[in-house]
Image (cartoon, helix red, strand yellow):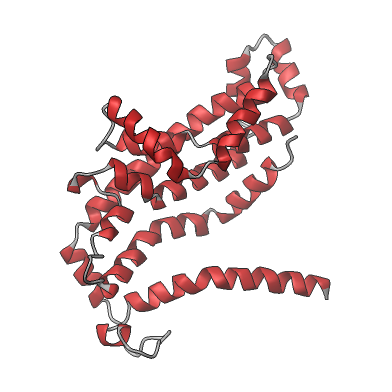
Amino acid sequence: MKRSLKYAAYYGLALLWFVPVLWMTSTALKPRSEIMSFTPQWIPSTVTLDNLRRFLEGYDYVTWMVNSMIVAAGATAVTLVTATLAAYGLARVQWPGRNVVFVVLLTAMFIPWEINAIPLFFIAKDLGLLNTFQGVFLPISAMPISLFLLRQFFISIPSELEDAARIDGCGHLRILRYVIIPVSGPAFAALGIFIFIFSWNEFFWSLIALRQSDMLTLPIGMKTLVSAHDIQYDLLMAGSFLASLPALIVFIVLRRQIISGISMVGVGK
C-alpha cells in the first residue's frame, strides 16, 4: 500500500506537469474554430498542420532557434569550464576560509534571478555587452547552482585517487585533468543538460539585454505574437510547440544521465 501511494503521487505530479504540454500540442494541431470554441476540446476533431505552416512562413523561427542555440551552447560551455575550476578549488584544495567563501557563494542561490537584472544591466552596458549573445549567456554561466552541483560531486571522489596522482608528481591541474574530470562524467552531463535547458527557456534577462530583431531568441520572439489588443493563440501554441521540441528531446533522450548525475552529486558533504 505504501509503495502504491508513493507511485500514485509520482504519476499524479507527472500528470500535472504533462497537462500544459498536452494542451499546447493539441491546440497547435487544431483548426482555429476549435481553438476559440467555448467548450474545450482536448482531442481535435481534425488534425491540421496549418498553424505550424503559417507560423513558419510568417515569423523568423529559424533565426530565433539559431540564436537560442548559440546562447544555450555558449552558456553550457562557459559554465562547464568555469564551474569545474571553481568547484575543484573549493572541494579538493585546502586553503583558509574555503568553507566561508563557499557559503557566501551559496547564499546567492536564494537571490531571485530578477533582482540581479538592474546591476547586470549596468555591468553589461559598461562592458559593451548589451545586444550581444555574450551579454546573455555570461550571467547565466555564473549561476551558483553550477558550482554547488560540481563541488558536491568532487568531494565524493575518493582521496586515494588524488594521493596516487600526487605521488606520481601531478600538480593540481594534472590531477583535475587526469583524475577528477574522467570520473565526473555523470555530474558534467547533468549540469550541462540543466544549463542548456535553462538557457534555452530563459526569457527575463534576454528581454532586457537583446533589442535588435535579428538577435532575438525563441522566448523573446514568441512574445511578438502577443499584442496589447490581440493574442494569436493558434500561432502562439504552434510556435511554443516548435520552440519546446529541442529542450524536450534533449531531456527525453538524456533523462537517465540527468537522474544519475543529480543522484551522485547528492552524496557530498
Indicate left or right for 51 with 203 as reference.
left
Write the residue at 64% across / 32% down: 151
The C terminus sits in image quarter: top right
Q: Is residue 181 visible?
A: no
Write the residue at 71% across / 30% down: 155
Indicate left or right for 262 with 269 as reference.
left
Indicate left or right for 263 with 63 as reference.
right
Percent x, y of residue 58: 16, 65
Q: Seen from this angle, which residue lies furthest right?
A: 1
Q: Quadrant of residue 185?
A: top right
Percent x, y of residue 165: 70, 16
| Depth order, front residue of 85/122 | 122
Q: Quadrant of residue 72?
A: top left
Percent x, y of residue 147: 57, 33
Q: Quadrant of residue 130?
A: top left
Percent x, y of residue 123: 35, 28
Q: Is residue 96 above or below residue 265?
A: above
Q: Is residue 238 above or below residue 122?
A: below
Write the residue at 63% across / 12% down: 171
The N terminus sits in image quarter: bottom right
Q: Seen from this angle, which residue lies furthest left?
A: 58
